[in-house]
Amino acid sequence: MVRKLLPLLLIVPAVEVMILIYSSHLIGVMSTFLLIIATSFMGAFLAKKQGTSLFQKAQRQMSQGHVPSGEILDGMCVLFGGLFLLFPGFLTDVVGFIFLLPFTRRIVKPFLLTWLRRFFQGRNRMTIIR
């Protein structure tokens, strides 16, 4: 897992810096800065709105005796989206909005579910501690 994550931790910030430099040359430093601030506020607003809505929907389902499995996965997407929007940069903002917006979240959820199944299948083996 670390072998896959380490290149991302090196490549993504470098790409973000390149995009920010290009953007500042294209639209100006102040415009780039304001755009980053604006996407952060929009993302925070959207994450709060989506998270509250999902929480209320999950509560309704639980009060009816149903397990809110779809809402739990949606909640994970909103959490991931909010985390990506915390990082400054346009690339992470795009990924964050993909996780936050309901119509793009529908595309991401099957891939996330597949990844979660694989992740937990590898850790599902019981170990006996002596």
Image (cartoon, rainbow, N blue to C red):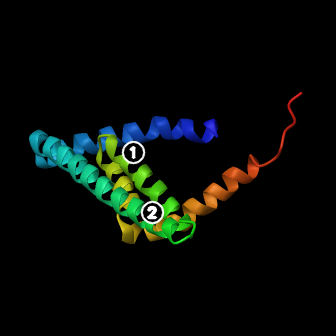
Task: Say which of 25 and 32 sits in front.
Answer: 32
Which secondary structure, mark 2?
Answer: helix
Above or below, 13 relative to 75:
above
* Residue identified by numbered label 1: 83
* Residue 66 % position (x, y): 56, 70
Give residue 24's position: percent from left, percent from top: 17, 42
Q: Residue at x 23, y 50 (%)?
A: 39
In the displayed structure, would residue 66 be above or below residue 17? Answer: below
- Total numbered badges shown on the rendered structure: 2
Kindly tell me whether residue 23 is visible in this rendering: no
Q: CA distance from mark 2 to mark 1?
A: 24 Å
Asked whether 111 or 70 is in front, the reply is 70
10 Å crowding of disc 2: few (<14), some (14-19), many (20+): some
Q: Which residue is denoted by mark 2 in the rendering? A: 59
Helix, strand or loop under label 1 = helix
Q: Residue at x 19, y 44 (%)?
A: 37
**Amino acid under disc 1:** Leu
Quarter of the image with the C terminus is top right
Q: Is residue 13 left or right of residue 46?
A: right
